[in-house]
Amino acid sequence: MKATDLPLLNASLNGLSACLIIAGLIAVKRGMQRLHVWLMSLALVTSALFLCSYLTYHYITAGLVTKFAHPGAPKLVYYVILFTHIPLAALTLPLVFMTVVPAIRDQLDKHRRLAKLTVPVWLYVSVTGVLVYLMLYVWFPGQG
C-alpha cells in the first residue's frame, strides 16, 4: 500500500464507522442491547483503525497538507466543513472514552447521558471526514 492510497482507506473507515454508529443507534432503540454493544464496539475499532491510518499518512507525507483551491461556493463549503470537523475530531476521542467507560462499568444512566452528546459529534466527524475526502480527491481533484 502506498501513502497515496491512505486517504481512500481513511474515508472508507470513516464511512464504515458512520454506518456502524447508525446501526448501533437503531439496535439500542429497538432494545437489542447485545447487538448495540457489538456494533458500537466495531465502530470504535473502525475509528481506531482510521486514527492509526490517518496518523501514518501524515507521518509518511511529513505533514503534507492537500490544499483546496477551487474558487467560489465549493471552497466556502469545504472550509466550513473542515473548520467544524477539525475541533470536533479532536473532541471525539475523549468523548468516546468518557462514554464507553461508564458502559463497561455498567453505569448505564451515565453512559446514556454522555452518548446523547458523543454520538452526534462522532457521527458528524465520521461523515464530514468522508465529505472532506470527496471534495479533495473526487469532486475537485488536483486543484491545489
Image (spheres, grey):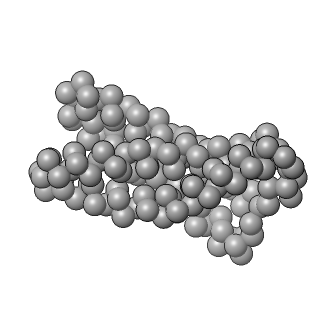
Residue 31 x, y percent position in the rendering? 19, 27
Task: Count the labels in the image.
Answer: 0
Q: Quadrant of the N terminus?
A: bottom right
- Look at 75% across and 57% down and name the residue there: 4
Horizontal side of residue 104 vs 40, given as left or right:
left
Residue 87 x, y percent position in the rendering? 52, 62
- Look at 87% across and 49% down and name the residue there: 71
Residue situated furthest top in the rendering: 30
Residue 141 x, y percent position in the rendering? 84, 47
Residue situated furthest bottom in the rendering: 62
**Residue 17 in view here:** no
Horizontal side of residue 62 vs 26, given as left or right:
right
Q: Say which of 38 and 98 sits in front.
A: 98
Image quarter of residue 28: top left
- Look at 43% across and 62% down and name the residue there: 91
Residue situated furthest left in the rendering: 106
- Look at 75% across and 69% down and name the residue there: 64
Horizontal side of residue 16 vs 33, given as left or right:
right
Horizontal side of residue 41 vs 136, given as left or right:
left
**Residue 33 in view here:** yes
Image quarter of residue 73: top right
Q: Quadrant of the C terminus?
A: bottom right
Q: Say which of 86 and 5 sits in front.
A: 86
Is the residue 79 above or below the residue 130 in the image?
A: below
Residue 116 x, y percent position in the rendering? 30, 45
